[in-house]
Image (cartoon, rainbow, N blue to C red):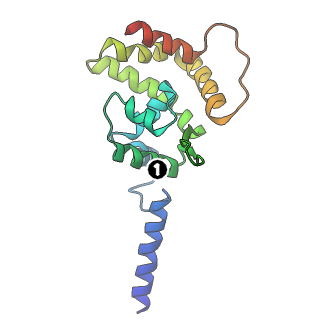
Amino acid sequence: MDRLIAECKRFFLGLCMAAEGNDRRQRSGCPINLTLEVVGDKWSLLVIRDMIFGNRRHFRELLAKSEEGIASNILADRLKRLVGAGLLTREDAGPGRRAAYSLTEASIQLVPVFAQLGEWGLRHRPTTKRLRVRAELLYAGGPELWSEFMAELRTIHLGVPAPERNGGPSVAERLAEAYAAAL
């Protein structure tokens, strides 16, 4: 009987932890594995990408403007998982208002990863001009541009005061202009 109770406790603890995004049953302690356990499915990075590069903050925006055509049930699941994993926050809306999602510091720090993934895609996969232009600009700008862009994202999503700029368009504006010019 004690063994049965212990097994039940382990089972329900696992369910509770998984529901909160804190499942201790990881395959290994490898940092790459642990990262892939959070963002390694085929949709999570695309949701974060759309928030970073498209400034999409609401469910309907993410759904309607998805290049890849994410289904509503998949999007709802990924948003819940990303919030549970600490990569997004969800601002609960009042009656008649839409919930807004924000990036966290952890997801903002994925900007260099997106730059590297974009560069790899440019080199090794067939792409379209319209969808490659931001990857080209981001990669060409290197770590200095990435840092500047991450600072902009911190202002938008975390409320951190904007750092002083040297004038000219912001990184987000340059990325948007490059995309618009490619249309």
Residue type marked 1 = Lys
State the residue in front, 149 or 72. 72
State the residue in front, 127 or 66. 66
Q: Is residue 71 visible?
A: yes
Q: Position of residue 7 (x, y in %)?
A: 40, 80
- Determine the residue located farthest toward the front in the rendered image: 96
Q: Quadrant of the N terminus?
A: bottom left
Identify the residue at image location x=33%, y=22%: 121
Q: Is residue 24 visible?
A: no
- Determine the residue located farthest toward the bottom in the rendered image: 1
Identify the residue at image location x=62%, y=20%: 148
Q: Residues within 10 Å of mark 1 (few under 14, many from 20)?
A: some
Identify the residue at image location x=54%, y=40%: 101
Secondary structure type for disc 1: helix
* 77 vs 123: above or below: below
Identify the residue at image location x=64%, y=7%: 168
Q: Which residue is mark 1?
A: 80
